[in-house]
C-alpha cells in the first residue's frame, strides 16, 4: 500500500511539474508569435480604420474576420447578433471554455486626423447621412483579437480547454428600432454551446501610454440608464401666467432638484454617480406658456444600491416638485446597459498574468469610468475581466491626446503586441490554473 501511495504521490508531482513547465514554454511562444504578427495586425487595423462600418452594418468587417478565422481552421459562426462572428477553437486537452471579445463598430464622427489611412466613409445613421470613423479604437480591438486567434490556433494541441472568439457588432448601440450589441448576442446564446466559463476583454485607451495596462476590481465602468420626464401643466397666454400652470418653470425647478440627488443623497466617497439632463423640449412661440415639457437625461452608477436609490429619488423629486406647482410629472426610466463589473476573485487570480506580460510597474488600478460598456451584459452571466490597454505614444501627456469619440482621436500602434500577449496569456494561465 505504501508503495502505491508513493507512486501516486510521485505521479501527482510529475503532473504538477509538467504543468509548471508547460505555461512558460507557451508564454515564450506567445511572445515570439506576437512580435512576428505585429506588422500584420497593424495592416488589418489600418484597413478597418479606413473602412469603418456603423453598428449592425459591419458586413465587410465581419466577412474579413470570418475569412481569417476559417483560414486558421477555427470553427466559425456568422450572423450572430445581426453581423457578429464567433470562432470556436477546441484545444487538444479537456478544460474550461474561455471567451475573448472584440467590438467591431465605428461611430458617426467625421475624422479630422491627418492619417494616410483616415476614413472618408459616409454612411447612414437613423435615416441621416453621416461621416463614419473608428473614433473609439474598435478597429484595434478587432485586429488584436484576430492576431490572438492566430497565436492560439498555432498551439491548439497544447490548449487545455476551448477558446471562443466573440467579434461583436453595435457596442455603441444599435440604430433606432433595432436590437443589437452584447445584449442581443447573449440573447441568441453566444455564451452557450459550448457554455462559457469566463470572459476577457480589453479596450484601447488614448490617454494611457503604450506598454501600460489599467484595470479596476469591481465596478469599473458605469451603468447607463435613460430617463424621460413629461411635465404637464396648463396652457395660457404668456402675458397672463397666473391663468395657467407653467411646465417650463416647473421643469427648471426639477432640473435643479435632480442635482441634489448627487450632491446630497449619494455617498460619493463610496461610489461615483451622475445624473444629467441632456434635452428639454417645450413650447412653440415666445408668448405662449405650453401645455407640457419633455425632459430626457442619463443616469450613471457603479453599484446596484446607488442605482436603485437614484432611480427612486428621480421619481420622487420630479413628482413632488411638479405637484407643488400644481403640475404633474410622468417619469420613465429605462435600463440601457449594466455596470461593467470585474469579478473580484477572477481579477485577483488573473492580474499576475497581466503583470507578468507587461511588467508589474506597468499594471495599475485605474479610477472608475462613468462611461458605459456593453461588455457588462456578458459579465451578468459569467465572471469577466475587462481592462484598458495603453494607446498613447510614449512621453505624451494625457492633455495632449484627443479623447475617444472625437474627430481628432488617434491611437499609437505600438501597443498591439502587448494586447495580443495579454489576451493569449490570460487564456493559457486560466486554463493552467483551472476553474
Image (cartoon, rainbow, N blue to C red):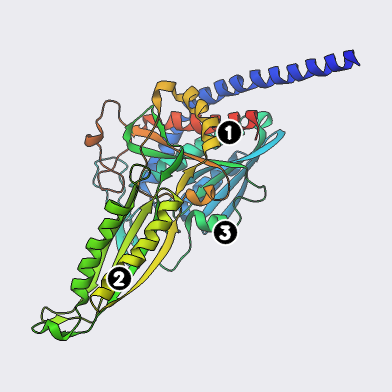
Q: Residue at x 51, y 44 (%)?
A: 101
Query: What is the C-alpha distance between the residues marked 3 and 1?
Result: 24 Å
Could you say whether the residue bearing mark 2 is in a helix, strand or loop?
helix
Query: What is the C-alpha distance between the residues marked 2 and 1?
Result: 53 Å
Give the number of the mark in front: 2 or 3. 2
Give the number of the mark in front: 2 or 1. 2
Residue 195 percent location from the top left of the image: 65, 47
Quarter in which the C terminus is drawn:
top right
The residue where tag 2 is placed is 320
Quarter in which the N terminus is drawn:
top right
Q: Quadrant of residue 410?
A: top left
Residue 351 percent location from the top left of the image: 50, 29
The residue where tag 3 is placed is 187
Q: Residues within 10 Å of mark 1 (few under 14, many from 20)?
A: many
Could you say whether the residue bearing mark 1 is in a helix, strand or loop?
helix
Q: Which is nearer the eye, 217 or 423?
A: 217
Query: What is the C-alpha distance between the residues marked 2 and 3?
Result: 38 Å
Q: Is residue 18 above or below residue 39?
A: above
Residue 427 marker: 1
- Residue 133 shows up from this direction: no
Amino acid at each position: 500500500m505504501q508503495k502505491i501511495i508513493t507512486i501516486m504521490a510521485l505521479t501527482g508531482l510529475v503532473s504538477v511539474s509538467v504543468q509548471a513547465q508547460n505555461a512558460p514554454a507557451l508564454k515564450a511562444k506567445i511572445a515570439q508569435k506576437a512580435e512576428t504578427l505585429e506588422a500584420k495586425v497593424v495592416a488589418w487595423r489600418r484597413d478597418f480604420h479606413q473602412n469603418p462600418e456603423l453598428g449592425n452594418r459591419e458586413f465587410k468587417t465581419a466577412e474579413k474576420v470570418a475569412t481569417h478565422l476559417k483560414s486558421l481552421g477555427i470553427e466559425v459562426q456568422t450572423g450572430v447578433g445581426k453581423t457578429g462572428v464567433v470562432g470556436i477553437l477546441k484545444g487538444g486537452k479537456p478544460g474550461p471554455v474561455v471567451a475573448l471579445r472584440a467590438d467591431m463598430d465605428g461611430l458617426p464622427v467625421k475624422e479630422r486626423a491627418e492619417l494616410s489611412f483616415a476614413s472618408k466613409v459616409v454612411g447612414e445613421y437613423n435615416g441621416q447621412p453621416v461621416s463614419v470613423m473608428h473614433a473609439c479604437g474598435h478597429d484595434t480591438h478587432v485586429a488584436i483579437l484576430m492576431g490572438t486567434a492566430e497565436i492560439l490556433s498555432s498551439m491548439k494541441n497544447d490548449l487545455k480547454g476551448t477558446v471562443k472568439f466573440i467579434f461583436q457588432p453595435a457596442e455603441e448601440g444599435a440604430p433606432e428600432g433595432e436590437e443589437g450589441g452584447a445584449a442581443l448576442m447573449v440573447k441568441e446564446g453566444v455564451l452557450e454551446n459550448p457554455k462559457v466559463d469566463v470572459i476577457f476583454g480589453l479596450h484601447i485607451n488614448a490617454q494611457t501610454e503604450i506598454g501600460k495596462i489599467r484595470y479596476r476590481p469591481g465596478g469599473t465602468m458605469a451603468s447607463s440608464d435613460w430617463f424621460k420626464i413629461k411635465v404637464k401643466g396648463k396652457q395660457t397666454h404668456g402675458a397672463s401666467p397666473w391663468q395657467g400652470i407653467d411646465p417650463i418653470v416647473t421643469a427648471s425647478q426639477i432640473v435643479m432638484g435632480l442635482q441634489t440627488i448627487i450632491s446630497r443623497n449619494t455617498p460619493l466617497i463610496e461610489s461615483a454617480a451622475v445624473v444629467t439632463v441632456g434635452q428639454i423640449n417645450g413650447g412653440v412661440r415666445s408668448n405662449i406658456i405650453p401645455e407640457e415639457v419633455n425632459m430626457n437625461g442619463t443616469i450613471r452608477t457603479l453599484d446596484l444600491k446607488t442605482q436603485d436609490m437614484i432611480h427612486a429619488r428621480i421619481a420622487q423629486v420630479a413628482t413632488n416638485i411638479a405637484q407643488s406647482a400644481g403640475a404633474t410629472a410622468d417619469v420613465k426610466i429605462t435600463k440601457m446597459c449594466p455596470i461593467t463589473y470585474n469579478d473580484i476573485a477572477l481579477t485577483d487570480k488573473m492580474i499576475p498574468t497581466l503583470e507578468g506580460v507587461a511588467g508589474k510597474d506597468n499594471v495599475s488600478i485605474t479610477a472608475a469610468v462613468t462611461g458605459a460598456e456593453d461588455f457588462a451584459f456578458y459579465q451578468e452571466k459569467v465572471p469577466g475581466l475587462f481592462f484598458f490597454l495603453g494607446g498613447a505614444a510614449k512621453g505624451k501627456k494625457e492633455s495632449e491626446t484627443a479623447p475617444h469619440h472625437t474627430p481628432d482621436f488617434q491611437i499609437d500602434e505600438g501597443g498591439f503586441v502587448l494586447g495580443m500577449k495579454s489576451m493569449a496569456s490570460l487564456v493559457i494561465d486560466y486554463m493552467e490554473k483551472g476553474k
